[in-house]
Amino acid sequence: MKIYLAPLEGITGWIFRSAVHECFGGFDKYFVPFIRPNQMGHFSAREKKDILPEHNKGMRTVPQILTNRADDFLRTAEKLKDFGYEEVNLNLGCPSKTVVTKGRGAGFLADPESLDRFLGEIFDRCPIRISLKTRLGMEDASEFAALMEIYNKYPAEELIIHPRVQKDFYKNTPDLGAFAAAADSSRNPVCYNGDIFSVDDYERLKKRFPETDRVMTGRGVLKDPALGRRLRGGRGADKAELRRFHDLLYAGYCEEMSGDRTILYKMKELWTYLAPLFTDSKKYAKKIKKAEKCAVYEQIIDELFSETEV
C-alpha cells in the first residue's frame, strides 16, 4: 500500500513535512499545499520556500497547483520541472468559498466542458506527469459519473478521490458507495482520501476496497504525527519523539516568522490537534491557549512533557 501525506493549506508546509519525515516517516509521497499562479508568473515567498529542493531532502514531494487557466498551469509546471520535480498535482477539491466562487478547486467541477478543455490542453503540453485530486462534485455525488468520463480521457499519474461534494466541506461522512463506483470505472490508478484518523480506519478501508493500493491522509496526521508509520505496522509516537517533533516545528517557525504572536498562533493551532495525545491534556491546552509570550509558552511545554504521559 502506498501512503501519502495530504496537502493542507497553511499547515503542512515544508517545516511540518520535514519534521514528520525526520521524526516518524511512513509516507511514500508528501504533497505540497497548493500553488496559486499569479499574474506576474512568480512564486510567492511561501510557495518558493515550500518547493526548494533543500527543504524537501529525502522526500518524494509533489507540488499542487490551483488554477482554471491552462497557460498558468503549464507555466508553473515548467518552473517546477526546473526545480527538479517530475510530477505535479491539480487541485480539483478545495471547498473554500473564496476559491470555488472563482471557478477553481471544487468550483471547477461545476463546469465540466471547460474542465475537459483545460485537461486536454495541459495533458497535451505539460512537461511532467500530472495527478488529479478531486471531489465528487458540487452538490451531489451523482455528478461524478460525468466527471469520471472526462477523467478517463486523460493519462493521469493517479486520481485521488475525496468522496465528499463541495457543500460537505469536511462534514458528514465520505460517500464510500460513490468511491466504490469510481474505483471500478476509473482507467487511472485511484487513491482514497478522507477520514483516515487511525489504524482501524485504515484496516476497514482495506477490507472494503482490497483493490485500492494507495491512500492519502491529512487531518489524521495532525492528531497523530506517527500515523504514517503506524499504518505500516510500526509503533506509535513516544514522548521523546513527540518532544523532538515539537522542537523541530517550534525552532523552524521561530526562524521563519517574526513576533511572538505569529509564532504562537502556529503552535496553538498544532496543539488543538496534538493535546489529546497527552494525559491531563485539557489543563495544559488551556495554558497554551492563554500564552502570549514565547518564554511563557516554552515553560508550559517543559511542564507538559515533564508532568504528563502519552
Image (tube, rainbow, N blue to C red):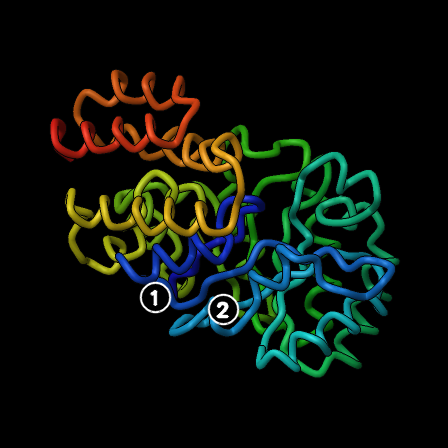
Q: Helix, strand or loop at disc 1?
A: loop
Residue sitting at 85 percent across and 50 percent down?
111
For residue 209, what is the image quadrant?
Answer: bottom left
Q: Residue at x 84, y 44 (%)?
A: 102
**Residue 80, above or below 11:** below
Instruction: List x then y, in percent, for residue 115.
Output: 81, 59
Please state which amino acid type lies under the numbered disc 2.
Answer: Thr
Q: Nearer the viewer, residue 294 or 202?
A: 294
User: Residue 1 shows which numbered tag?
Assistant: 1
Please state, as top left, top right, bottom left or bottom right, where the C terminus lies in the image: top left
The residue lying at 33 percent from left, 54 percent from top is 206
Relative placement, left or right, of 138 versus 118 is: left
**Circle count:** 2
| Pointer 2 residue | 61
Amino acid carrying label 1: it is: Met
Binning the other alpha carbons within 10 Å of mark 1 as few (below 14), some (14 to 19) or many (20 upward) gives few
Q: Residue 138: which disc?
A: none
Q: Where does the N terminus fall, quadrant-wise?
A: bottom left
Disc 1 and disc 2: Cα gap in Å? 18 Å
N-terminal of the two: label 1 or label 2? 1
The percent position of residue 86, horizontal first and vertical second, equals 58, 80
